[in-house]
Structures are given as structure tokens and as C-alpha cells.
């Protein structure tokens, strides 16, 4: 329970958290203190040394505080409140919610899912900044360890029949055996790959000794898959016992790039980059302290060591807190020599490179604003495209770019209702349906249409109907890469080597790729459903057997009667039915 006061004189001589508000009662700063009255009184001196404190106190109106039992408890509460309220003058991890986590669900037979919402249930790993990579990893682990993917365990499904699940729903694997598989996945995300391989080799030898050769062969393949992943992705260091996170920062004007490189069992297992909101008045120590506090707040692996490129204030407090989270001693170090120093320098160099890349992307937005004569930077750009074959399986796509990078959580597919082929009318439908969703999906700073003056005129008509002509819209004609705007007869020519044109091309090409991918998916589903399911004598089991053996409908089409008849469950007559259907 917080207590509100106007002056620091009434604060207690105890540890806790203080919350500053402005005249509109908005929280503008949250801080922790070992001694509340001493810490907060430092803000009310006649002469304030730091510009940031001067700016903060110029907006100060009222104060409230929460007493805690220790400074460590204050640290934890401060991190929680900053994440919840995101005060203007706190250094804080930006856009943390946009990064996905991998979750092992809290169920009798757990599943492995990707989520952006963290709750108290289940075990979480992350956040992961590379969404594509984490999707591949989860897909790899599901196929490798054959864990269930279904929400409802209502009997063996297709995954069991094609050997992608052990079917715990039908009792084909015990809870203990399944739990051992989940433990292997847990070790994988902790980076203990050698431990997994060691345990699997032991299991393989035991299975072979018991003459369970099929089981031994499955484990052998699992070992080979993990070793291949390790060989491709991880960089070896000298010490096999290393369990560290290497962190470095590259400060900018209004934000800071933070690089974290996890090292597990002596191997660099990845690299993540984050943005911290910070002003020019925040010190490197404050920024690094805030990152460690907010990054390790919950559901993350706590390493034995954290290596930094420079020392920070209140290091002992952070070490005590992290040690509590880990369950044993954690040290924060600034290495002076050897491999650890080289790692810190590597992280620092990566942070500087990413900062430079972000600066270049900012410049491309500035260039685009100049060429298109926009009122503001086009931080959110949306691209649209239509894909169909003679009007069949017609789909539309919307892709979104934020600050020059794909924002895939805002991508959207549309099944077109307009009869075709009529790309103009379909594009009109696509834009109308999307722009009617502005209350749920905020409007972009720029719309990019794949096409010339004709397509652009139709698209601008949609904006006029919906009274949204304030949204800038352009057409990008593919042949000469000319940029058309609604109020000009002549196209804008952006130089071919200009970053602004490259960005527009990327948006246009991505919207095309996204539409084509969905179109092919619908077409593929239709082909598989309308062919095998319509053949006399082909039921669910035979369909699964055929797909498992041949891999695709196209391969089945090309198979001979003899090849078809040899598949388990098939006979000569049914094989002839399949062959005759396609020939």
C-alpha cells in the first residue's frame, strides 16, 4: 500500500520505493532507496547538479512511497513498477512485450509453445529477438522429441500416424518417460547440449543392450541432429564450464543499443539485441544497472557470471539479488585480460554495428520523407498486394514495417470475396476491409501499392470514401521503379542506389511474397483435399500411409500401380483406383 505526501520531510528512515507524479497525476519517475528520506531529499536541494534531475523536478507535483523490508525488496518492486507504468524519466527496456518467449506448458503432458504473454503457469525461456530462428528451433524440437502439439488429448491424431508424436493421449508413453523428454528440452534451452548428448548416448547403449534396436536407432538420429545443430550454430571457447552472459552497450542520442551474448558450456549460443530508452544525461552505469534489473526480472536463466565492459554502481546489490534468483553465487565482472576481455570487446563491437545500422535506417526514413514531401517520418509503412490464378484462391496481403524493419505481428492475410479475375476490384476490397479496422489496428504513416497510376487512383478513391485522405499513399511501378503520388501526373524518380528506394522495394516485395505464400497454401490444401479424399477405397489410414511414403500428392501422382500397391494397407485394386484417378 502506498502513502502519498507533498514533501520529503514526512518520509520514513527505511528502505523502499518512491513514486513521483506531475500535476496531472501521471507517474514520471520511480526509484528505489536504502533510506527513503535521505534519497528523496537529495532531489530537493537548492542547486541540482544533474540536468536530468533539474528537468524531472520541473515537472514534479506530488510523491508517494512504499516501504519494503530491505533494499533488495525495493529493487524487485522498482523493476515491477517500472515495467507496469513505464515512467517518462526512467531508463527502461523498450518494446519488451514484442519479443516472444518459448513456454513449456504446465500440463500432465506438457506442450512447447511460442507466446508473447508471460503468466505464473509453465516454464518460460526468452525473450528471443529473432522470431524466425525461435520458430525453427521449436519446430526442430517438436519433431526431434515427438512431443504433443494438440490442445485437446482426444485420441491419436495424424502426427502419431506419421511418427511425429508418441500419443500420450492413447497411453503409448508413460508420464515418467514423457517427463524425461521435457527435461531434455529444458537442458536444450539452458544451453547444456553436451549433457543432452551424453544422456542420449547412455540411453542408446541401454536400448541396444536390451535389443530394442528400433528405439536405439531413433536415439542415434536424435544425437546426430543435436550435434549437427551445435556444429552449425555455436562458437567454441576454451573453458567447457563457462556459464556467462556478456553484456555491452552503445549509447545514442535518445536510446541505447544493448547486446547480450549468452555462453553455455563454453559455447556462444546466440546474440540478442535490445533497445533502452535513455537520455543524453543518463550515465552508462545507470543504463547498465536498469538493463540488468529489468532483463533478469523473471523467467530467465541466471548465469554464474555476467561480464560487462565497464563497472556499475550498486553492483553488490545486483549480485545478491541475482544470487537469490539463481540459488547460488552470481558475480558481475569487468574482465581486464584474456578470452573474457575479448568476449566483451566482441559484444561492444556488435552493439556499435547495430547502432550504426539503426542510424542508417533512420537516414533512409529521412530521405523518404524528403522525396515524398511527407509531413512526418514514415515510421509505420504498410504494403498491399493481391495473388490469384484466374480469380481462383484470391488472397490479399498487408505487411507492416516499423522504423524500416518488418513488423510481422501486424501482417495480415485476407481471403478475397470479389469475383475475379479483377485485381483492381480486389485491391479496392482489400484496402476497404483493412482501413475499416483502424480502431483495432492504428493507421500507418504511409501506404505502398504495387502498381502505377491506375492502381493508385483506385486506392486513393478508397481513402476518399472513408475520409482518410490524410494518410499518404503511393504506387510503386515495378518496370522502372517509378513512384506515383495521387496529386501529381509525373512520377517521382528516386535514384536507384538510394536507401529510400530500397526500403520501398523491400515493402513492395515483402507484400508480394506474403500474398504468394498464402495463395500457395490455400491452393495446396484444396489439391490435397479434392484428390486423395475423392478416390474410391482411400480412407484416412491409406491416405496417411501414402503421404508418409511418398511425401506429397505430386509424388503419388507420378507413382506406378506397382509402387502404389506395395504401400502398407494398399491392394492392387485400390492402387489402380489411385493411378486411374490421376491418369
Image: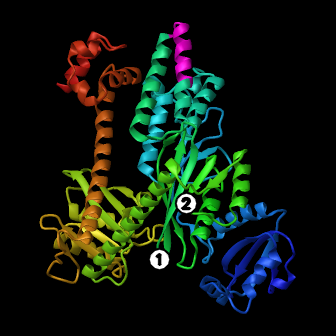
Residue at 52% from the left image edge and 33% from the top image edge? 193
Q: Is residue 412 magenta?
A: no
Examine the image and state in which quarter residue 109 appears: top right
Q: Is residue 211 magenta?
A: yes
Residue 259 pos. (x, y %)? 49, 58
* In this picture, residue 340 sits left or right of residue 15: left
Q: Earlier in the sequence, mark 2 or mark 1?
A: 2
Q: Dot 1 corresponds to which residue?
A: 253
Residue count near mark 1 (Cα–Cα under 10 Å), binned few <14, some 14–19, many ≥20: few
Q: Is residue 202 visible?
A: yes
- Residue furthest toward the bottom? 46
Residue at 31% from the left image edge and 57% from the top image edge? 396
Indicate which disc residue 97 carries. 2
Foreground label between 2 and 1: 1
Residue 181 pos. (x, y %)? 58, 29
Residue at 26% from the left image edge and 80% from the top image edge? 372
Q: Nearer the viewer, residue 381 or 325?
A: 325
Label 2, label 1: how many angstroms apart (C-alpha)? 23 Å
Indicate which disc residue 91 carries. none
Residue 322 pos. (x, y %)? 69, 53
Which residues, given as a range, are shown in magenta? 199-212
Amino acid at each position: 500500500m502506498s502513502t502519498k505526501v507533498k514533501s520529503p520531510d514526512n518520509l520514513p528512515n527505511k528502505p523502499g520505493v518512491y513514486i513521483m507524479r506531475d500535476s496531472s497525476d501521471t507517474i514520471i519517475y520511480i526509484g528505489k532507496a536504502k533510506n527513503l528520506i535521505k534519497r528523496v531529499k537529495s532531489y530537493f536541494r537548492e542547486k541540482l547538479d544533474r540536468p536530468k534531475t533539474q528537468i524531472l523536478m520541473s515537472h514534479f507535483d506530488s510523491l508517494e512511497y512504499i516501504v519494503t523490508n530491505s533494499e533488495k525488496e525495493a529493487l524487485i518492486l522498482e523493476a515491477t513498477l517500472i515495467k507496469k507504468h513505464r515512467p517518462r524519466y526512467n531508463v527502461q527496456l523498450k518494446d519488451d512485450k514484442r519479443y516472444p518467449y518459448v513456454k513449456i506448458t504446465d500440463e500432465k503432458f506438457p506442450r512447447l509453445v511460442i507466446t508473447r504473454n508471460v503468466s505464473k503457469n509453465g516454464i518460460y525461456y526468452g525473450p528471443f529477438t529473432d522470431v524466425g530462428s525461435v520458430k525453427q528451433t521449436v519446430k526442430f524440437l517438436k519433431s526431434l522429441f515427438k512431443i504433443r502439439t494438440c490442445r485437446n488429448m482426444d485420441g491419436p491424431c495424424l502426427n502419431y500416424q506419421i511418427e511425429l508424436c508418441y500419443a500420450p493421449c492413447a497411453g503409448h508413453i508413460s508420464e515418467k518417460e514423457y517427463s524425461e523428454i521435457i527435461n531434455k528440452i529444458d537442458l536444450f534451452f539452458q544451453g547444456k547440449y553436451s549433457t543432452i548428448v551424453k544422456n542420449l548416448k547412455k540411453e542408446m547403449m541401454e536400448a541396444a543392450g536390451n535389443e530394442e534396436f528400433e528405439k536405439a536407432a531413433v536415439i542415434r538420429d536424435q544425437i546426430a541432429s543435436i550435434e549437427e545443430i551445435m556444429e552449425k550454430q555455436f562458437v567454441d571457447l576454451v573453458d567447457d564450464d563457462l556459464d556467462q552472459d556478456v553484456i555491452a552497450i552503445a549509447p545514442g542520442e535518445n536510446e541505447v543499443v544493448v547486446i547480450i551474448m549468452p555462453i553455455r558450456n563454453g559455447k556462444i549460443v546466440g546474440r540478442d539485441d535490445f533497445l533502452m530508452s535513455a537520455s543524453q544525461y543518463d550515465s552508462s552505469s545507470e543504463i547498465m544497472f536498469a538493463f540488468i534489473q529489468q532483463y533478469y526480472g523473471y523467467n530467465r536463466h541466471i548465469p554464474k557470471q555476467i561480464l560487462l565492459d565497464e563497472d556499475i554502481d550498486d553492483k553488490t546489490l545486483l549480485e545478491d539479488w541475482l544470487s537469490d534468483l539463481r540459488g547460488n553465487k552470481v558475480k558481475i565482472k569487468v574482465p581486464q585480460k584474456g578470452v573474457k576481455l575479448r568476449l566483451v570487446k566482441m559484444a561492444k563491437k556488435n552493439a556499435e554495428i547495430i547502432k550504426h545500422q539503426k542510424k542508417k535506417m533512420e537516414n533512409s526514413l529521412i530521405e523518404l520523407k524528403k522525396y515524398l514531401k511527407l509531413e512526418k517520418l514514415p515510421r509505420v509503412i504498410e504494403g498491399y498486394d493481391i495473388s490469384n490464378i484466374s480469380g481462383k484462391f484470391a488472397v490479399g496481403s498487408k505487411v507492416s514495417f516499423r522504423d524500416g524493419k518488418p513488423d510481422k505481428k501486424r501482417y495480415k492475410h485476407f481471403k478475397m470475396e470479389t469475383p475475379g479475375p479483377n485485381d483492381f476490384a480486389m485491391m479496392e476490397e482489400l484496402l476497404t476491409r483493412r482501413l475499416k479496422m483502424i480502431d483495432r489496428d492504428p493507421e500507418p504513416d504511409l501506404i505502398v501499392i504495387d502498381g502505377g497510376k491506375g492502381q493508385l487512383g483506385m486506392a486513393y478513391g478508397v481513402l476518399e470514401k472513408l475520409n482518410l485522405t490524410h494518410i499518404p499513399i503511393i504506387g510503386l511501378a515495378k518496370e522502372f521503379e517509378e513512384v506515383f503520388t495521387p496529386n501529381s501526373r509525373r512520377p517521382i524518380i528516386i535514384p536507384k542506389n538510394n536507401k529510400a528506394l530500397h526500403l520501398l522495394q523491400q515493402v513492395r516485395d515483402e507484400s508480394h511474397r506474403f500474398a504468394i505464400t498464402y495463395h500457395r497454401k490455400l491452393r495446396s490444401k484444396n489439391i490435397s483435399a479434392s484428390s486423395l479424399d475423392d478416390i474410391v477405397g482411400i480412407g484416412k489410414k491409406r491416405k496417411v500411409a501414402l503421404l508418409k511414403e511418398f511425401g506429397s500428392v505430386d509424388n503419388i501422382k507420378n507413382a506406378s500401380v506397382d509402387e502404389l500397391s506395395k504401400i502398407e494397407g494398399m491392394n492392387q485394386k485400390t492402387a489402380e483406383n489411385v493411378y486411374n484417378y490421376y491418369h
